[in-house]
Amino acid sequence: MMKPDRRGEILKAALDLFTEQGFHGAPMALIAMQAGVGAGTIYRYFESRDVLIRELYKDLEERIYPYILAGYAETAPFRSRFLHLGTKLLRYFIEYPLCFRYMEQFHNSPYGIAFRRDKMLGKEGHCDVFRELFEQGAAQQVLKDFPLVILFCLAFGPLLAVARDHVLGFVQLDDSMIDRTIEACWDAVKR
Amino acid sequence: MMKPDRRGEILKAALDLFTEQGFHGAPMALIAMQAGVGAGTIYRYFESRDVLIRELYKDLEERIYPYILAGYAETAPFRSRFLHLGTKLLRYFIEYPLCFRYMEQFHNSPYGIAFRRDKMLGKEGHCDVFRELFEQGAAQQVLKDFPLVILFCLAFGPLLAVARDHVLGFVQLDDSMIDRTIEACWDAVKR
Amino acid sequence: MMKPDRRGEILKAALDLFTEQGFHGAPMALIAMQAGVGAGTIYRYFESRDVLIRELYKDLEERIYPYILAGYAETAPFRSRFLHLGTKLLRYFIEYPLCFRYMEQFHNSPYGIAFRRDKMLGKEGHCDVFRELFEQGAAQQVLKDFPLVILFCLAFGPLLAVARDHVLGFVQLDDSMIDRTIEACWDAVKR
Amino acid sequence: MMKPDRRGEILKAALDLFTEQGFHGAPMALIAMQAGVGAGTIYRYFESRDVLIRELYKDLEERIYPYILAGYAETAPFRSRFLHLGTKLLRYFIEYPLCFRYMEQFHNSPYGIAFRRDKMLGKEGHCDVFRELFEQGAAQQVLKDFPLVILFCLAFGPLLAVARDHVLGFVQLDDSMIDRTIEACWDAVKR
DNA sequence: GATGAATGAGCGTTCATTCAT
DNA sequence: CATGAATGAACGCTCATTCAT
């Protein structure tokens, strides 16, 4: 007889519904019902709908790091580390399509844009692993001579695009294609 | 004393507001006001809000082709043609940031997903130029051995990511950076 | 090359549409279109929608009298005259179901109630034939001892109900049934 | 301190307003205000305006049966039973004029027509008492030789017409007139 | 704490009517 | 005169949020 994890249930319900129906199609009452709680209860855990949306994003983002960092060797050569992180990230999105679709939806919404702007201004970011890696690569002149922001675009742009098309069912990625996709990303950023 | 182009005014107002406020934040009444017309007038030109959103997309899309095709030499070597189209496209997005942001928003919404799905199924598409180019490149084995869909991702993924960051003000692209960005896209797809 | 009878066209279109779609479902623009005139034109002939609705009623009502009075012998015995008028009226409704349905709809709407109230107050009425007949019948004590209003109800209540069910397709009236229906009406009013 | 019966308040407000103003003239906001509830509250109890209109009808209809069946003797002679039900029905309409007017309005609207059509097709109906009675009367050859539908018209046509004129204030029915009216209905149907 | 009924501002859309052409 | 594009008030309905229980 566990005490029910209401916050978790609400986040799970929100993820399902926002992903399936978009932000538009998922009213609070529906989320509450799917989570098996009363409508008012959500407001005990999240100040408002907007806060719920943002917290869900943060929650999902945090779960990525343990996954992609498993087996990550800080001391491996730069290219290996890039391929490791890229491959893991793409695999993660493929394995957790709801997570991917939610993050995409979030990024392409007023929430996501404000969120990202805050992040850029704050200098800090959760993607410290990537930032560190890319800064190192830039310093060692392994990467093309671009501002960090652009390098991120070159590396993650294709990765996310491929993930999106997989999730939407426009392609079926197998292991080999995943690896070769990340190698193409590498081609884009490597000097 | 020109007769006022009401359809155009409405599209322009919709573009401004949808871009600034998102689909959420731009009620029909506001669009009408910004366009300087009565609320009901919009419905003489667009059957519904959804139709307005889709028509605006098509309208913006159609303006791209003349721009990027100017000076395009069908007979030039493959790489040149790729660079030409890519560069023009990126420049276009930089020059018309509202257009870019709207198209992004559209793509990442139920509208855009349905739209794209229709396009894929219909085989036909407005991106015939790109499709033709890539099919040729694939046939000549200039491009990596990937399905067309993935090649598109590898080429446009970074391009769009870079455009987005420019438009949001996270980087300032100059001419050289534009060219080098497209070359990086080329690196991603070329064999 | 007749001059087009715009007023008539509008009335005809209004009859068709109000009958098929109800007052709700027939906007002025649709009536105009069906009549083959501009939307504004209707207002040259009818001050407003309400006026159009009332004028259409009067127009239809007026056409009934010539039909039912054809062959009517003022000098015939009372019962014959009653049967003549009743039968003719029922036949008329069966022959012109649009007319019947419109009149019914009109009667059972705020328009019709106001209209009827005015008529009752004004003493005068278009149904002078019926009024005259019934007053005579009352005076001769052929009819039951009821106020005129009630006698009308007893006579026309069943008649209209039968017409309604025929028009809605719940019964198919043949000649014999029409005659016997009117005889039943007679049974209701006769002393 | 009773818990307020909101559903009932809404139905009552709807009855008042629909009766006074017609379906046209009674917007949801007005009904809500008259019922003393918020506009959205109505939708907790009735899925839509149309559903409210239909439920109100059913609600009113159901209240009639206990009233008219009080003191009804299944074993009494046919004529007595007819007079009992008819008289009770007419009295009910006179006592509850809002109910009568609402039902009339309902019957003479797309709602009522669809409703009645469903009833006819479904064979079943709430008017089982009447149907049973009339079927018996037809079998015993007490009633005229007509289809059931017509017999209903002959009996209820005058009854409803009289009720209507009373409710609209065109006559004042006293006890004797009520009885004699129903006897006239009987004359219309009896063989 | 948890609930879910109640709220009411706000939305997309319609349509009778007007009026410049 | 006839037109039909333009208007804008009004409608039915939704849903984030509150609060009495």
Image (tube, coloured by chain):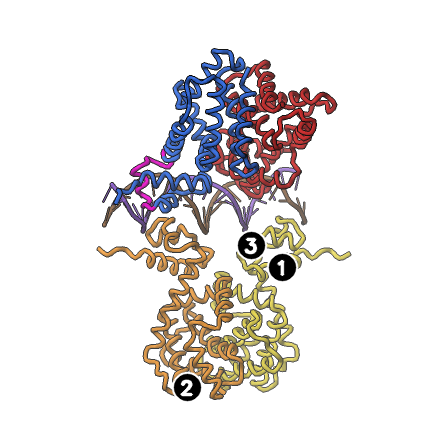
Chain colours: A blue, B red, C yellow, D orange, E purple, F brown
Magenta span contains residue D79? no
Tag nearer the camera, 2 or 3 = 2
Circle 1 packing at 10 Å, graded few (<14), some (14-19), many (20+), is: many
Location of mark 2 (residue): D78
Q: Nearer the viewer, residue C103 or D54?
A: D54
Q: Residues within 10 Å of mark 2 (few under 14, many from 20)?
A: some
Instruction: Kindly identify which chain the residue marked by label 3 belongs to.
Output: C
- Residue D190 position, x and y percent, is 48, 86
Task: Mark yes or no: residue B101 visible.
Answer: yes
Q: What element carries label 1?
A: helix
Q: Do the residues labelled 3 and 1 touch (CB within 8 Å)?
A: no
Q: Does the magenta stretch include residue A50?
A: yes
Residues tagged 2 and 3 counted as in contact (Cβ below 8 A): no
Q: Residue at x 48, y 15 (%)?
A: A137
Query: What's the mark number on residue C170?
Result: none
Q: Give the range drawn in magenta.
A: A36-51
Please give the chain letter of the residue carrying mark 1.
C
Name the image quarter holding residue A61. Answer: top left
Label 3, label 1: how far apart the Cα atoms are: 12 Å
Q: Is residue B126 left or right of residue A141?
A: right
Q: In this view, does A145 lie to the left or right of A116?
A: right
Instruction: Name the residue located 33 percent from the left edge and 44 percent from the top edge.
Output: A39
The CA distance from mark 1 to mark 2 is: 49 Å
Q: Mark 3 points at which residue?
A: C49
Q: Mark 1 points at which residue?
A: C11
Distance Cα–Cα, label 2 vs label 3: 50 Å
The crowding category of the residue bearing disc 3, from other C-alpha atoms within 10 Å (few below 14, some 14 to 19, many at least 20), is: few
Question: Tag 2, which secondary structure?
Answer: helix
Q: Which amino acid does label 3 sit on?
A: Arg
- On the image, the x and y values in percent for residue A43 come to 31, 39
Marks 1, 2: nearer the viewer: 2
